[in-house]
Image (spheres, rainbow, N blue to C red):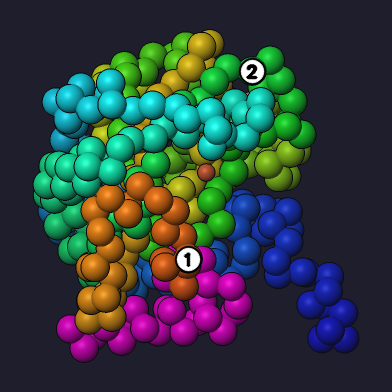
């Protein structure tokens, strides 16, 4: 009986999770995030941005990297050898020395945000990766079976200690395919209105007022909890350039070795180093991660 029930519910089936919890995440991550929000974060640090980030899962940040982006923009280049054929998303590259200097400048500029997030998460907050991309237009954007760069609504399969900071590399208007997000408080209505089943199966003509767009100017910063909120990359009429900074919250004390990642290395894929803190692969590992956080909160 127990086994049959387990099979029926299938805890890893995101479709079932949408049905029961209006979330497209593995069950154990939904549970982690629920208890993490309840017992581990400090939303009441008297800061407007953190409050909104906690309540809605996203916030504009009152920091502009306009100066830095304008200084480095002409140093980004696309190396076609390293791109997948026919890809609608291209990765910008940067010479080693520029990587290092830009990473230092980004770190310096977003330091006030990191300090606030460290208070919110009770953790050290690290940049794990910096990526620079160009998303191109394509004519199958309404086809839910085809996704070129996360351009259909989804949640990222991570626990909520993983957050994304988007930095506009150009002014972004409606035609430039801005990031679209569904605030936490609209999640239930969104699933209902769009008859959301999974990333490949929902109704495109739901209530669009439930969705917010990240419009803005070059250098603007937008923080969002991609595991907690439904989001998608809009499809531009031409192209959109974006920088994505991944932020990871790790309990103090166990985070020391991670300080050693070289600045220029931040532009590489560091997923493996951070995976156990952001995307644990088994139920036991998720539970262990939760209790590690809990222990560090109460033992300082
Ligand atoms: Fe995503």
Q: Residues within 10 Å of mark 2 (few under 14, many from 20)?
A: some
**Above or below — where is 219 with respect to 5?**
above
Q: Position of residue 197 (x, y in %)?
A: 73, 44
> In which quarter of the view is residue 126 placed?
bottom left
The secondary element bearing badge 1 is classed as helix
- The residue nearer to you, when weighing 201 against 90, is 90
Q: Please state the horizontal and vertical placement of residue 161, each as a whole percent of the image.
A: 38, 63
Q: Position of residue 84 (x, y in %)?
A: 62, 35
Stretch in magenta? 277-300
The residue depicted at 54 percent of the width and 20 percent of the height is: 136
Q: Residue at x 39, y 14 (%)?
A: 173
Can you identify the residue that label 1 sits on? 272
Label 1 or label 2, whichever comes before in sequence order: 2
Mostly what secondary structure, the magenta segment? helix
110 in relation to 235, above or below? below
Residue carrying label 2:
138
- Can residue 290 be seen here? The reply is yes
Is 235 or 238 nearer to us in this picture?
Answer: 238
Which of the pair 153/243 is nearer the observer?
Answer: 243
Query: Depth-wise, is mark 1 or mark 2 nearer the camera?
Result: 1
Residue at the image position 28 percent from the left and 80 percent from the top: 254
Q: Is residue 78 above or below residue 298?
A: above
Splitting the image into 4 quarters, where does residue 7 fall? bottom right
Say which element carries label 2.
Answer: loop
């Amino acid at each position: 009986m127990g086994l049959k029930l387990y099979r029926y519910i299938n805890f890893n089936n995101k479709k079932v999770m949408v049905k029961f919890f209006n979330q497209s995440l593995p069950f154990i991550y939904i549970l982690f995030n629920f208890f993490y929000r309840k017992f581990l974060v400090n939303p009441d640090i008297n800061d407007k941005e953190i409050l909104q980030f906690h309540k809605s899962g996203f916030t504009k940040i009152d920091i502009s990297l306009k100066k830095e982006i304008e200084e480095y923009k002409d140093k980004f280049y696309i190396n076609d050898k390293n791109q997948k054929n026919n890809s609608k998303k291209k990765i910008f590259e940067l010479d080693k020395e520029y990587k290092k200097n830009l990473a230092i400048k980004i770190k310096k500029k977003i330091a006030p945000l990191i300090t606030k997030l460290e208070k919110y998460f009770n953790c050290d907050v690290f940049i794990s990766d910096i990526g620079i991309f160009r998303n191109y237009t394509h004519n199958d954007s309404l086809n839910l079976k085809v996704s070129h760069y996360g351009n259909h609504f989804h949640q990222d399969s991570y626990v909520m200690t993983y957050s994304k900071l988007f930095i506009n590399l150009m002014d972004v208007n409606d035609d430039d395919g801005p990031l679209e997000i569904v605030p936490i408080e609209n999640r239930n209505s969104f699933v209902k209105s769009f008859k959301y089943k999974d990333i490949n199966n929902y109704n495109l003509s739901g209530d669009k007022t439930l969705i917010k767009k990240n419009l803005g100017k070059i250098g603007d910063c937008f923080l969002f909890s991609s595991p907690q909120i439904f989001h998608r990359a809009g499809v531009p009429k031409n192209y959109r350039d974006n920088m994505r900074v991944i932020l990871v919250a790790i309990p103090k004390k166990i985070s020391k070795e991670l300080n050693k990642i070289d600045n220029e290395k931040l532009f590489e894929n560091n997923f493996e180093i951070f995976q156990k803190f952001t995307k644990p692969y088994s139920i036991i590992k998720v539970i262990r991660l939760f209790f590690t956080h809990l222990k560090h909160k109460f033992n300082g």
